[in-house]
Image (cartoon, rainbow, N blue to C red):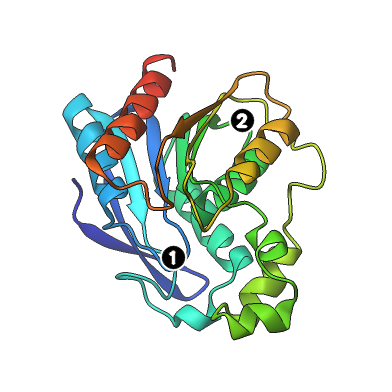
Amino acid sequence: MGEIAYNAVDGRSIAYRLCRGKAPTIVFLPGYASDMEGAKAVAIDAFADQRGLAMMRFDYSGTGSSGGRFEDGTLAVWLEETLALIDGLTEGPLLLVGSSMGAWIALHVALSRQERVAALMGIAAAPDFTDWGFASGEAAEQQGLARGFWESGQKLLLLDRAIPITCPVRLVHGDADSDVPLETAFRLMRQLRSADVQLKIIKGGGHRLSEPHEIDAILRTVAALTETK
């Protein structure tokens, strides 16, 4: 597991951990208000280390060890940071692993870096949650979501049209997820252009999917994707 280092993106100090190794480079994208030290991120990092795979995880500005104010963060800002770190710190094929909101960002990364993204995995993927999760910007603010984030998300919606991603995609979702309905995973499957999309449903799984058997299921999926690249 790499030591924490920092990279400047448009004046913001972004904390990251990077381990060099074999391709593909696994890039973990945290969820909203989460960071790179969560159970899933650490478990995937250990998996990569054991197999000599390259791995990068990081904190968006305003979260974890990165600088900035959380309330200034938007989907567009965090996407910009993700692309800057990928472009500046990694090379070769990528396996993107996004958790919740991180999967939304990962989908946008795959759209803008199609030549590099070999595969994508969404854990409790939450694309478009500003749209289906809140009736309006006012409602988002009342429920604790920054208005700037809601407005940014509304400009980056994906589920209302075909998504021209053609790489293999794997989705892991709990059928008891009270934050992101399982139907969101089915909607995403239908919109992805890739012919190689699989959804693994975990019985009784909530949104965090951080129980030992749930993390085991995630790691098995990551292993299958890395073995075929």
Q: What residue type is labelled 2?
A: Glu
Residue 139: where, in percent of width, then height? Answer: 68, 80
Q: Which residue is drawn at 38% across and 22% down?
A: 226
Q: Where residue 60 is drawn, which disc sits there?
A: 1
Q: Looking at the picture, does residue 66 appear above or below residue 191?
A: below
Residue 119: where, in percent of width, then height? Answer: 52, 28
Residue 130: where, in percent of width, then height? Answer: 67, 65
Q: Residue at x 71, y 73 (%)?
A: 151
Task: Look at the image and tell me in which quarter the N terminus lies.
Answer: top left
Residue 154: where, in percent of width, then height? Answer: 74, 65
Q: Looking at the picture, does residue 81 appear above or below residue 24?
A: below
- Name the mark nearer the viewer: 1 or 2: 1
**Numbered disc 1: secondary structure:** loop
Q: State left or right for residue 204 relative to residue 182.
A: left
**Numbered disc 2: secondary structure:** loop
Q: Where residue 178 is drawn, which disc sits there?
A: none
- Answer with mark 1 or mark 2, whichever residue precedes in sequence: 1
Along the line of sight, the residue nearer the viewer: 18 or 35:
35
Q: Which amino acid does label 1 sit on?
A: Tyr
- Quarter of image, res 189: top right
- CA gap between label 1 and label 2 equals 24 Å
Characterize the local packing of mark 2: few (<14), some (14-19) or many (20 or more) Cα atoms within 10 angstroms. few
Along the line of sight, the residue nearer the viewer: 186 or 62:
186
Q: Residue at x 75, y 76 (%)?
A: 136
Q: Which residue is labeled 2 in the image?
A: 115
Q: Which residue lies furthest to the right in this view?
A: 161
Q: State left or right for residue 75 relative to residue 69.
A: right
Task: Look at the image and tell me in which quarter the C terminus lies.
Answer: top left
